[in-house]
Amino acid sequence: MKESGEMYLETILIESKKRDYVRSVDVAAGLGVTRPSVSRAISKLRDDNCILIDDSGYITFTEKGLKIAEKIYERHRVLTALLLSLGIDEETASSDACKIEHVISDKTFDMIKSKFSK
């Protein structure tokens, strides 16, 4: 999956922790993008069997989509915490973690997580 798809899934997960349901407008606000951009991405995620959209426009995850979203969100949290522990300010740490989370290998992330979480 491309980085943009991962970002959308992560944002849907984050928004779902804030409210009982997530709509495209919530995703647009969370990412700071236009509703047409979200519409295209949501269609692609639905076609890729990552999300479902009901008749009210509420977005929910498929098992596949939830697995990807949780993986990216965990990477973001762990990498942000690691960067914060190095003395990097919160805004920079979160921004850098967001970039790293999409390109870091599973092997490297697992090693960081095992060493850093102790």
Image: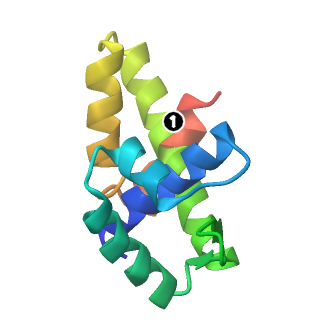
Q: Nearer the viewer, residue 60 or 81?
A: 60
Q: Is residue 89 visible?
A: yes
Q: Where does residue 34 sit, x and y in percent of width and height?
A: 26, 55
Q: Amino acid at mark 1?
A: Val
* Image mark count: 1
Residue at 60% from the left image edge and 76% from the top image edge: 53
Q: Nearer the viewer, residue 5 or 1?
A: 5
Residue at 55% from the left image edge and 86% from the top image edge: 49
Element assignment for label 1: helix
Q: Residues within 10 Å of mark 1 (few under 14, many from 20)?
A: some
In the displayed orientation, state which residue is furthest to the front.
Answer: 56
Q: Where does residue 100 sit, x and y in percent of width and height?
A: 30, 46
Q: Is residue 99 above or below residue 43?
A: above
Q: Identify the image quadrant of the C terminus.
A: top right
Q: Is residue 3 visible?
A: no
Q: Where does residue 65 sit, x and y in percent of width and height?
A: 58, 72
Q: Where does residue 117 sit, x and y in percent of width and height?
A: 61, 31
In the displayed orientation, state which residue is furthest to the right.
Answer: 20
In this image, 81 relative to 34: left or right?
right
Colouring convention used in this rendered image of the protein: rainbow
Q: Which residue has dot 1 on it?
A: 78
In this image, 52 relative to 107: left or right?
right
Residue 90 placement: quadrant: top left
Residue 56 placement: quadrant: bottom right
Q: Is residue 99 above or below residue 12?
A: above
Q: Identify the image quadrant of the N terminus.
A: bottom left
Residue at 26% from the left image edge and 23% from the top image edge: 92
